[in-house]
Image (cartoon, helix red, strand yellow):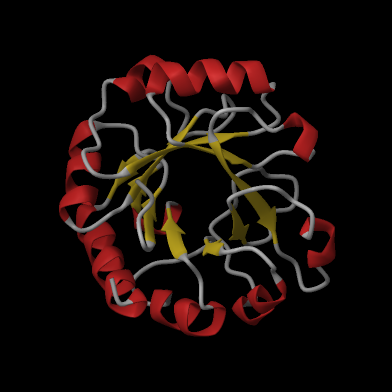
Amino acid sequence: MTPNVILKVCGIANQPDADAAIAAGATAIGFNFYPKSPRYIAPESAAAIATPGALRVGVFVNEPAPRIAEIARIAALDVAQLHGDESPAQYPAGIAVWKAARVSPDFDFSQLDGCPADALLLDGPAADLYGGAGLCFDWTLASRARHRIIVAGGLDASNVARAVSLAQPWGVDSCSRIESSPGKKDHAKMIDFLHAAKAALGA
C-alpha cells in the first residue's frame, strides 16, 4: 500500500525511535545500508525493527542490484532509495525505486526526464558526501522535476511548511536535523517535525 503522502524519518537504527516516529504520523521509515554512513544498520538489525503501517525504505549507494534485492528480502523493504550513480539499467528488479538527486543551483533536471523511478528524492548539496549533509536547496527548483518528488535536506519543524509551500511535494524526509546524535533521534524534534509536516501536507 502506498501512502497518500510521504512523511519519512530516515536513519532509524532502533525500535524506540521507530515507535515514536510512527506514533507521531510517519508513513515511511528509512534504514541506511551504506557502510560508510554513521547511521549504517545491518540488514538483520533492520529486519528486527517493526514498522507497522509504514513503508520500509532502504538507503543504498552504488550497491549492486543483486545485493539490494538480497537486503530487501532480509529487511522486508518496500522501497530502494538510491543515492549513488546508478543508471536505470542498474536499478533492482521487483522493488519500488526512489532516485535521490543532490540539487545545486545549476542542477539539470532534464537528465532525469527518462528516469523510471517511482519518485525523486531531492536532497541538498553535499559535495562528495552521499546521502546528504543536512543542507537545504532552493525549493522553488522542484517545479522543474517531472516526477512526483520527496523533499529532503535540512528539514525540521521550523522550515518544513515553507518547503512544502514552495516545492509542492508528494512528501518530505528528515534525518540529521531531528537527531541528538547520528542514528539516535531527538524525539521532541522528530515529533514536532512530523506534526508540522502533516499540517503542511494536509495529511
Q: Which residue is found at the position 26% from the left and 28% from the top? A: 49
Q: Nearer the viewer, residue 31 or 158?
A: 31
- Would residue 44 be visible to someone looking at this image? yes
Q: Which residue is found at the position 53% from the left and 58% from the top? A: 134
Q: Position of residue 124 (x, y in %)?
A: 63, 62
Query: Does residue 106 lie above or below 56 as drawn?
Result: below
Query: Does residue 7 lie above or below 16 as drawn?
Result: below
- Would residue 86 be visible to someone looking at this image? no
Number of marks in picture: 0
- 134 on left or right of 116: left
- 93 on left or right of 108: left
Q: Position of residue 108 (x, y in %)?
A: 83, 66
Q: Nearer the viewer, residue 47 or 190?
A: 47
Q: Which residue is found at the position 42% from the left and 52% from the top? A: 175
Q: Which residue is found at the position 43% from the left and 35% from the top? A: 78
Q: Position of residue 203 (x, y in %)?
A: 28, 71
Q: Position of residue 34 (x, y in %)?
A: 57, 29
Q: Residue 105 is drawn in which quadrant?
A: bottom right
Query: Does residue 200 lie above or below 133 as drawn?
Result: below
Query: Does residue 122 lie above or below 144 as drawn?
Result: above
